[in-house]
Amino acid sequence: MESLDDVIDAMIADRVIHRHRRKWLIAVGLVLVLAVVIFFTGGWKEHQGRSVDTLEAPTTLKAGRFEIGITNATIIRTPKTEYEPAKARLEVELQLKNIDEETHVSASFQEGDLLRWVLPGKDPIKPKNGSCKGVIGYVLVYGLPAENCIATFEVSPRYSTDEVEIGVLAEEYAGGDEVLGLSDAKFWGGATAQAVVRVPTKITTETDG
């Protein structure tokens, strides 16, 4: 016949086992739920590195028919006024040169086609506009020195960072027959990623008027 102490010890042991069993069941349940979530979201995705070089500004690179220099960037904030809400923009300073050895034709740098603001976890963002000498759509003449230009991106009034990544795309000079089988004539087009440039960024404030 079991003693009272043995019965008490057995009851305590049973409660301890029951308590730990409940914790293990909860843990196993969480693991199963996590496994289901991973399964339906594509599994553990291996991090893939960039297929293009990542450069540090200031830098200059050849991208198709243009030579593109990228130096620095500025977030320009405009405070709220009685009539206007607060706003801000990101300006990336560029030095652009037409190096079109294929056609020697003057051309406007289409920043919306050839530049992207690269943000982690988001689709690359096209510039709102670009200008050289204050002229949007400025035409770059083949053979002339590089022009100082600006690519402008929209940002929220409180956005802040000390570095941005700007993606550069390059057009290819190729014939239509190589893509569509229609013509032997060659032209610039089919922009593809060339590089990503890390650009140091400062913040400044301006007032309207």
Image: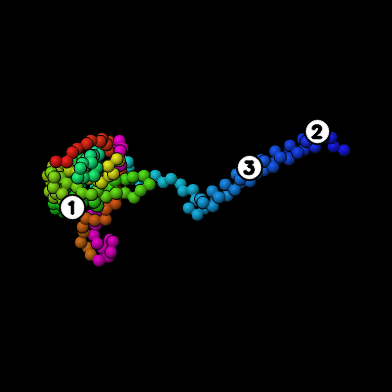
Separation of marks 1 and 3 at Cα, in angstroms: 72 Å
Q: Residues within 10 Å of mark 3 (few under 14, many from 20)?
A: few
Circle 3 sits on which residue? 23
What segment carries the magenta color?
A: 160-182
Instruction: Name the residue nearer the viewer: 90 or 176.
Output: 90
Residue at image coords 24%, 56%: 189
Disc assigned to residue 102: 1
The answer to whether residue 62 is seen in the rendering is no
Quadrant of the drawing holding the C terminus? top left
Pointers 1 and 3 in contact (CB under 8 A)? no
Q: Earlier in the sequence, mark 1 or mark 2?
A: 2
Q: Which residue shows up at 20% across the image and 42% down it?
A: 82
In the picture, the quarter occupied by the N terminus is top right
| Element assignment for label 1 | loop
Give the SS element for disc 2.
helix
Could you give the CA–CA distance between mark 3 and mark 2, rounded to whole angstroms? Answer: 27 Å
Confirm whether residue 110 shows in the render: yes
Report x, y in % for residue 99. Answer: 17, 47
Q: Nearer the viewer, residue 131 or 84?
A: 84
Looking at the picture, how far across and down is residue 201, in whole percent?
27, 36
Mark toward the viewer: 1 or 2: 2
The residue sitting at 27% across, 65% down in the picture is: 181
Q: From the viewer's perspective, is the residue at label 3 or at label 2 nearer?
A: 2
Residue 159 in the image: state x and y as whole percent. Answer: 30, 40
